[in-house]
Amino acid sequence: MKIAVISDIHANLAALRTVIDFLHAESITAIACLGDVVGYGPFPNECVDLVRRHCLLTVAGNHDYAALERLDATAFNRYAREAIQWTRLELNQDSRRFLAALPLIVSQDQICYVHSSPREPHDWNYVFSGSTARECFHYFEERLCFIGHSHIPVVFSQQQGATLGTKVPLSLREDRYIINVGSVGQPRDGDPRACLAVYDPEQALLTYHRLNYPIKETQAEMRRKKMPEFLISRLEIGR
């Protein structure tokens, strides 16, 4: 059974709907979400509702924690802080209850799922480099660890280092992997399309998918809700 892994939706409803529609068309119903369901975008409650209904597994992200005031947002840049303050006022009680119940890290079927890093996930560290990834391999036992947080898709092999590509074969008998699945709603690798990863355990194959979604629809709602122009314009460039 193929497993779709999504992350960093950031209240971008148009992007999330596009991803879910794509997965349903591909008959992929096992979906894991790596957090940051909210923050930045204009549809926090709607995105929480879709994740709750369609994802079999969800872990918490730092923006989810910040929206619940479990995390001090002073370390965020001013645009992210402004969006979090807006999100705190916007979240309904059902959304709050769902986000509050999310774990930081989950191990299921020999796969580790975490938003930021398997090393002290509550510290929200980034895994940008091969050297950082090598340290993180000591903090989980599974062959695979899926992460988000940086919004940049990349596969870190314990033996080979970093790998980029649309299709990445996995040598699970000989190697272990930390896989960043990119971002559904806020890509930061220069490609504005929604990003997700699909893992096929039978073929030991990871496939990244990039999907066009109606960016202007999200931007129009952000402008209507008077969200920072910086957050609105960056959606077009994926940075």
Image: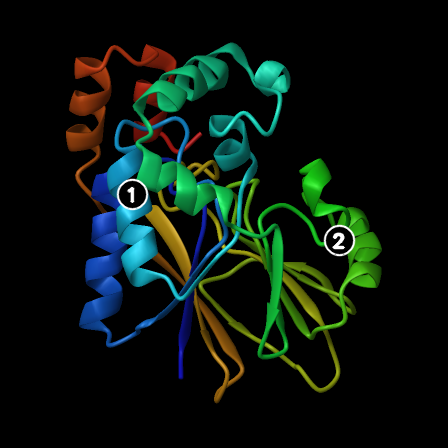
Q: Nearer the viewer, mark 2 or mark 1?
A: 1
Residue 238 in percent (x, y) is at 39, 33
Answer above or below: position of 2 versus 189.
Answer: below
Q: In this view, does 179 lie to the left or right of 97?
A: right
Residue at the disc numbered 2: 133
- Amino acid, disc 2: Ala
Q: Nearer the viewer, residue 140 or 151?
A: 140
Q: In which quarter of the image is the C terminus?
A: top left
Residue 134 in percent (x, y) is at 81, 56
Circle 1 residues within 10 Å: few <14, some 14–19, many ≥20: many
Residue 58 in percent (x, y) is at 47, 56
Answer above or below: position of 179 versus 200.
Answer: above
Residue 26 disc label: none
Q: Nearer the viewer, residue 165 or 19?
A: 19
Please give the name of the residue rendered at 48% of the width and 46% of the height, measured from the top-left corner. 35
Residue at the disc numbered 1: 47
